[in-house]
């Protein structure tokens, strides 16, 4: 007797027995390929300069690749897990192997070889506990889909109108439209000339620049989710939704383009648009996405410096040379964080609380901490201190290794629940939150939180307030899902780029 898959989609059971031989053969091929890859990396990257830190780095990379393979072929799209494992595998999995072998770090300073092993232990602890937490955080959910906090076209309309008004009010005060298509140095000069920067209180800059960018991102996510699900009630509502989507796309081009926005904001918008509009129901699409994330982070990520300024373009390095640059300073900053704790001790949440309360001006809170990455860089005597600080390193600085275990275990559980929310049959607040978090996660992992939270936090708050605060449909733009289902329609017959599930 063939048993149906407990995870049913659209009320149709999916049978597993036919796919089992192919899955087993695929697993065998993947295992052989992984062993061959590990042997090759061990011979070329670890053996020439054998160290315990290098060996631990190879273990980290193996864990990332195995976990990425599992979530890619889990039978459902898991963007939070895929982006996590892809970024860690490239940024602090592969890159440190090259750096340790050649003893060349991203930033030229006195090496701290005595802290290399501790840094790798912190990273390995983080990925292992995330993996365990992820496996324990995704129970099979029974019963009907959640109907509370549905995403509607009315909410997309409200978010787009607010984004448009903010753009019209704030854009002239931060240099105007043309400045947004120059480069970051020109934009920062325009903001400084307008008297919005230069002091220690940057609240006004955030209000006039970061807040509109965050609202524009939320507007695009809501529009694309509604467009994908075809939840318009009438042809007129569909035209309105298409117009809103076009407006939100233009606003994001203004605020989140790669010329003047940091690359993580640009990547977040691109990923959010992809996750909101594309279903990834075919296994081949999920496989291509995971492979594309690895390749994009290994190749496109450093190439994004082409948009930064003339100095970055002139110093652009390709191939293995790119892994010696500050684009891949995650391992070195983890080492520096170990040094900081060794000298100064743990900070016990001061930087985390300050990051979460980013909206409180320093003029009111005089003891508000600056981003932890700046503090760690300053402890090493760096003249340029606006550096990354990996999330696991920041947690270790704040709460020690024990804090890394606790935080990343629950991080994994939350990530699993967010990934499962994307499988709901009706678009809702959890699904929209999952799209937004999966898109912004790379920036949060790179850190520091004090630099990344303002955009991400403002986007999350905007999304929650919009969906929860605007739960009624006064203009009749959004169809009733029960009526549509009764008529034989169902939300999963919607548009967007979609395909039937299959191998």
Image (cartoon, rainbow, N blue to C red):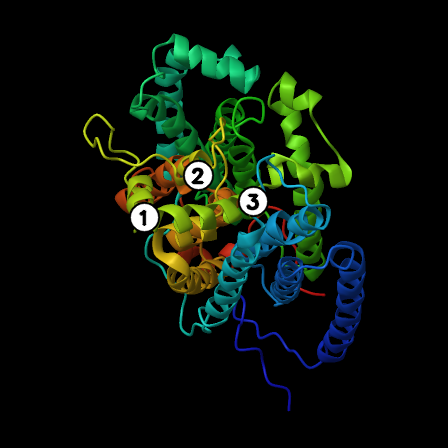
Image point 77% across, 69% down: which residue?
Answer: 35
18 relative position to 109: left or right:
right
**Disc 3 versus disc 2: nearer the observer:** 3
Secondary structure found at label 1: loop
Q: Earlier in the sequence, mark 2 or mark 1?
A: 1
Percent x, y of residue 162: 35, 28
Q: Quadrant of the N terminus?
A: bottom right
Mark 2 and mark 1 residues within 8 Å of each other at the beta carbon? no
Q: Which residue is mark 3?
A: 332
The disc placed on residue 241 is: none
- The tag earlier along the polypeptide, 3 or 2, is 3
> Which residue has dot 2 on it?
373
Which one is nearer the viewer's eye here, 199 or 217? 199
For the residue labelled by badge 3, is the local secondary structure a helix, a strand or a loop?
Answer: helix
Residue 487 visible in the displayed image: no
In the rendering, which numbered label is found on residue 347? 1
Residue 145: x percent and y percent?
41, 64
Residue nearer the viewer, 57 or 300: 57
**Relative horizontal placement of residue 44, taking residue 368 as reference (left or right):** right
The percent position of residue 20, horizontal first and vertical second, equals 71, 79
Q: CA distance from mark 3 to mark 2?
A: 12 Å
At label 1, counting other C-alpha atoms closer than 10 Å, the crowd grade (few under 14, some 14-19, many 20 or more) is some
- Split into 4 quadrants, where in the image is the C terminus? bottom right
Give the residue at x 18% y 29%. 364
**Mark pair 2, 1: CA separation:** 13 Å
Q: Give the residue drawn at x 46%, y 16%.
A: 188
Q: Residue furthest bottom?
A: 1
Structural crowding at the residue carrying mark 3, measured as other residues with C-alpha within 10 Å and reported as few (<14), some (14–19) or many (≥20): many
């Amino acid at each position: 007797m063939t048993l149906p898959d407990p995870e049913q989609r659209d009320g149709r059971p999916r049978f597993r027995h036919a796919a089992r031989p192919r899955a087993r053969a695929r697993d065998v091929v993947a295992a052989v390929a992984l062993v061959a890859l590990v042997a090759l990396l061990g011979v070329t990257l670890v053996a020439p300069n054998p160290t315990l830190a290098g060996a631990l780095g190879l273990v980290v990379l193996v864990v990332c690749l195995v976990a990425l393979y599992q979530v890619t072929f889990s039978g459902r799209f898991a963007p939070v897990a895929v982006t996590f494992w892809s970024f860690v595998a490239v940024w602090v999995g592969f890159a440190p192997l090259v750096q340790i072998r050649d003893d060349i770090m991203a930033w030229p300073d006195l090496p701290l070889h005595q802290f290399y092993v501790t840094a790798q232990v912190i990273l390995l602890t983080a990925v292992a506990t995330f993996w365990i937490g992820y496996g324990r955080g995704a129970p099979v959910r029974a019963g009907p889909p959640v109907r509370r906090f549905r995403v509607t076209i009315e909410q997309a309309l409200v978010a787009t109108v607010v984004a448009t008004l903010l753009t019209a009010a704030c854009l002239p005060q931060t240099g105007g439209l043309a400045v947004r298509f120059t480069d970051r140095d020109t934009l920062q000069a325009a903001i400084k000339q307008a008297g919005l920067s230069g002091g220690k209180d940057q609240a006004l800059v955030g209000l006039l620049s970061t807040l509109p960018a965050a609202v524009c991102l939320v507007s695009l996510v809501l529009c694309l989710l509604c467009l994908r699900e075809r939840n318009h009630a009438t042809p007129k509502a569909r035209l309105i939704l298409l117009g809103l989507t076009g407006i939100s796309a233009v606003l994001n081009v203004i605020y989140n383009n790669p010329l003047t926005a940091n690359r993580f904001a640009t990547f977040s918008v691109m990923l959010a648009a992809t996750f909101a509009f594309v279903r990834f129901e075919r296994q081949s699409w999920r496989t291509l996405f995971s492979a594309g994330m690895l390749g994009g982070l290994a190749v496109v990520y450093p190439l994004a410096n082409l948009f930064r300024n003339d100095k970055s373009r002139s110093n652009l390095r390709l191939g293995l040379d790119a892994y010696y640059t500050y684009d891949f300073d995650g391992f070195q900053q983890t080492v520096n964080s170990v040094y900081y704790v060794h000298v100064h001790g743990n900070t016990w949440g001061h930087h985390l609380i300050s990051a979460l309360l980013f909206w409180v001006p320093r003029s009111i809170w005089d003891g508000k901490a600056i981003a932890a990455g700046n503090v760690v860089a300053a402890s090493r005597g760096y003249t340029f201190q606006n550096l990354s600080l990996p999330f696991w390193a920041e947690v270790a600085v704040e709460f020690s290794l024990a804090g890394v275990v606790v935080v990343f275990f629950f991080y994994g559980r939350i990530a699993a629940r967010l990934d499962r929310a994307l499988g709901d049959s009706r678009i809702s607040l959890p699904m929209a939150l999952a799209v937004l978090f999966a898109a912004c996660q790379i920036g949060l992992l790179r850190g520091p939180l004090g630099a990344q939270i303002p955009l991400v936090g403002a986007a999350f708050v905007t999304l929650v307030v919009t969906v929860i605060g605007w739960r009624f449909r006064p203009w009749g733009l959004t169809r009733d899902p029960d009526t549509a289902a009764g008529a034989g329609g169902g939300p999963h017959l919607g548009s967007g780029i979609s395909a039937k599930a299959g191998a």
